[in-house]
Image: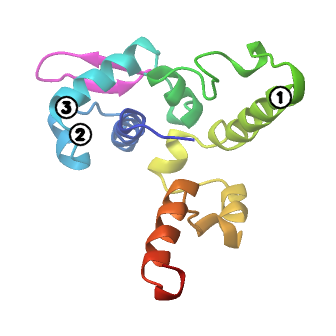
Amino acid sequence: MHITAKVDYAVRTLVEIAKAQPDSVKADAIVAAQDIPPKVLESVVADLRKGGLVTSRRGPDGGYRLARPAADISIANVIRAVEGPLASVRGQRPEDVHYGGAAEPLQRVWIGLRVNIRSVLERVSVADIAHDLLPSFLDELLHDPDAWTRRPNSAARDIATEWQDLDRPDIR
């Protein structure tokens, strides 16, 4: 799964707003705290407003507030507000994609992937992050030795192998 910069900025924006509740937060404060470019913040907040996650008010007492309690805003809600569905295949929902022949089981793989993405992103809220009270199931996932292991993509591995082979005089 690829987390876009826009999603990352949106979550960080909401966390800053949640941390300040019940007070509102001015754009300048979010920009300074999270190092988000001001124009990008405007775009992100517009999506969050359309998604029903943020309200705003102009003026000296203005700023941004959460449209509902931080505990009721999951990371999945944020992604959907900013980018759309959590998992899509060529722009379609996995249940709408159909394959023939040997690839027929692939649809079930994409749906299984979506279930697993949901199992984390729908269970972690903005409040959990803002108050550093992440759900215990995350600790279990993070204790898996594989969780912190980076796997190179196959193209990078192939290139690395080619370069290693060039360094070996016995196979030139």
Of the pair 154 and 10, the residue shown nearer to us: 154
Q: Quadrant of the N terminus?
A: top right
Q: What is the x, y in percent for residue 28? A: 14, 36
Task: Name the mark on residue 27.
Answer: 3
Residue where numbered disc 1 is placed: 103
Q: Secondary structure at mark 2?
A: helix
Specify whether residue 170 is painted magenta: no
Q: Nearer the viewer, mark 3 or mark 1?
A: 1
Task: Decide: is 132 above or below 46.
Answer: below
Q: Earlier in the sequence, mark 3 or mark 1?
A: 3
Q: Amino acid at mark 3?
A: Ala
Give neighbour class at mark 3: few <14, some 14-19, many 20+ (Cα, 10 Å). Answer: some
Give neighbour class at mark 1: few <14, some 14-19, many 20+ (Cα, 10 Å). Answer: few
Residue found farthest to the left: 60
Q: What is the x, y in percent for residue 109? A: 80, 35
Do the CB atoms of the residues marked 2 and 3 lie less than 8 Å apart?
Answer: yes
Residue where numbered disc 2 is placed: 30
x 64%, y 15%: residue: 92
Whether residue 140 sits left or right of residue 150 in the image: it is right
Whether residue 168 sits left or right of residue 114 in the image: it is left
The stretch in magenta equals 54-67
Of the pair 39 and 19, the residue shown nearer to us: 39
x 57%, y 40%: residue: 125
Task: Specify the quadrant of the image occupied by residue 21.
Answer: top left
